[in-house]
Amino acid sequence: MNHSLHRRYVQLQIRALVLFGQRQRALEKVDQVLAFSPSDAHALATRAHLLAELGDKSGAQQSLRTLVTIQAEQPAAWFNLGYLSEEMGH
């Protein structure tokens, strides 16, 4: 399976796991993606979202900080980082 097709397959797996409420398993898949591609913006954003939903706001904040470092021009990442930081009282 070529890299692009495999990546799409894993993204669909993650989406299905989230839809079926399997957030922890989805997070494990996202972490697998990040192990091979640590600057994958979509994976970092997904990881932040999943961590926040699982109650790990500090971990979510760290993922968002990494994301805005990699893609400083990404307004959604900055918004989410600001929102989460305010919610955490930072």
Image: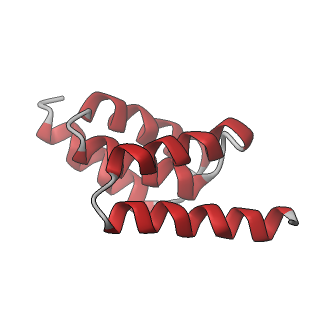
For the C terminus, the quadrant is: top left
Viewer-side residue, 23 vs 62? 23
The x, y position of residue 86, in whole percent, is 16, 40
Query: Total number of numbered labels?
Result: 0
Q: Is residue 21 left or right of residue 36?
A: left
Relative to 44, is 32 on the left or the right? right
Residue closest to the far right: 2
Q: Residue at x 27, y 59 (%)?
A: 21
Q: Position of residue 6 (x, y in %)?
A: 75, 64
Whether 87 is drawn above or below 73: the answer is above
Q: Nearer the viewer, residue 37 or 2?
A: 2
State left or right for residue 83 relative to residue 68.
left
Identify the residue shown where x is 71% and y is 44%: 37
Position of residue 1 measured from the top left corner of the image (x, y, whole percent): 86, 66
User: In the image, what residue occupies the spot 38% across and 52% down?
Assistant: 78
Q: Nearer the viewer, residue 35 or 86?
A: 35
Residue 52: which quarter of the image?
top left
The one nearer the camera, 21 or 40, is: 21
Name the residue: 29% across, 28% down.
58
